[in-house]
Amino acid sequence: MKGKPVAEQEVGKLLINETVGYAETNVCRRKVLLNYFGEKYTQEKCGNCDNCLHPKKSFDGQEEIVTMLEVVKAVKEKFQGDHIINILTGKVENAVKLHRHDQLEEFGTGDEHDVKFWTAIIRQSLLNGFLSKEIETYGTLKITDKGKAFMKKPFKVDIVEDADYSNTESDTDDDFAGAGGSGAAADPELFASLKDLRKKLAKQRNVPPFVVFQDPSLEEMAINYPITMDELKNITGVGAGKAAKFGKPFLDLIKKYVEENEIERPLDFVIKSVVNKSVLKVYMIQNIDRKISLTDMARSKGMTLGELLGEIESIVSSGTKLDISYYINEVIDEERQKEVFDYFKTAESDSAEFALLELGEDDYSLDDIRLMRIKFMSELGN
């Protein structure tokens, strides 16, 4: 629900990307698996997996690793891999422009290589211990002590070239494939039907479609085929409130689709977990009810305001109504509140970054936009 995906969406996306990375990598699979669970495999190869038995070409990647680490350092280790790659390849993406990272000296220093190449560099830098990935902040890359030492005194590092699947035939619809980053795993026909239903309900209620359910939620429905309320509540971005308000027609559609197409549904849903999520959620709801300043709440939890807003966005996107007007009234005047609220009424996207670019960076901060989007989603969607 935010320009930067809400907490549950980010965790889901991170897990999907990890799975894709494991499937596509040509590094020893045992080494990759042990690294994922925090263990180190001291041998270079296990000699038993497909990648070890059929090794691919490799090259000395020390220069490229240093180039990538310099970008991570330049953005103060506060961003995820896709953002780092956009800077390396010189892509003026909205988040890059918003943070003025297109003005960095490092911008475009890796534009001779493509996204897939730099994805492999980051993945194998993680395996070699030059980088660490902060799960609590949904994949933020940090330079380890080993990485810092490597930057000062680089040495030869064999990088395995990732396989190129770009020419592989696919029946996946282009529009669907871009919806949530994992289109190939879902059912494009069901996804299209869910989008049509969402559009219809949104028109009936006179709200933007994303107020009903966001694309990542519909995409996950098209993967897991939920047919009961309990199953629907396990979908990213769908809580009890959201399920009760909008869920029945979607469940009816999915159930009919499953029966007509004789779909074998997954028996188990992935259980989404964020460390201390339930405790933090209760804390936030209680303190917002008490009208405690969001700034004070963030400070007491050792969080930035942006991180706190991310957690609140996750709560609201799942269907819980929160009234943060008391805080908004302190930091945003009434006229500007109305302007942002009116913007989201007609917006095609719920992206905070798009809204900021449209409304003007001189008049608003990203936090201003996110605060008003929370108010908008809570009042109209919940």
Image (cartoon, grey):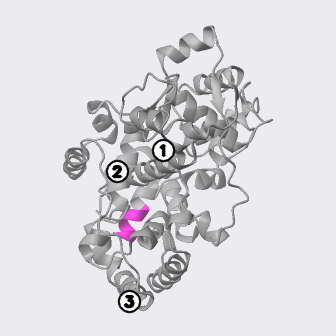
Front position in the image: 129 or 101: 129
Residue 380: in magenta span: yes
Question: How far is mark 3 from mark 1, CA to CA?
Answer: 45 Å
Q: Mark 1 points at which residue?
A: 367
Q: Name the residue under label 3.
A: 259
Residue 127, placed above or below residue 7: above
Front position in the image: 382 or 363: 382
**Residue at x 48% of width, y 14% of height:** 145
**Residue at x 35% of width, y 47% of height:** 311
Q: Are marks 3 and 2 in contact (CB under 8 Å)?
A: no
What's the residue type where badge 3 is placed? Answer: Glu
What are the residue bounds of the magenta stretch?
376-382
Q: In which quarter of the image is the C terminus?
A: bottom left
* SS class, disc 2: helix
Location of residue 164 in the rendering, given as x and y in whole percent from the top left corner: 69, 49
* SS class, disc 3: helix
Crowding at mark 2 (Cα within 10 Å: few <14, some 14-19, many 20+): many
Residue 88, placed above or below residue 266: above
Q: In this view, does 246 lie to the left or right of 124?
A: left
Front position in the image: 95 or 256: 256
Location of residue 360 in the rendering, given as x and y in whole percent from the top left corner: 64, 49
Front position in the image: 331 or 306: 306
Residue 20, placed above or below residue 46: below
Question: How far is mark 2 from mark 1, CA to CA?
Answer: 12 Å
**Residue at x 31% of width, y 77% of height:** 245
Mark in front: 2 vs 1: 2
Q: Name the residue under label 2.
A: 312
What's the residue type where badge 1 is placed? Answer: Asp
Location of residue 174 in the rendering, given as x and y in whole percent from the top left corner: 67, 69
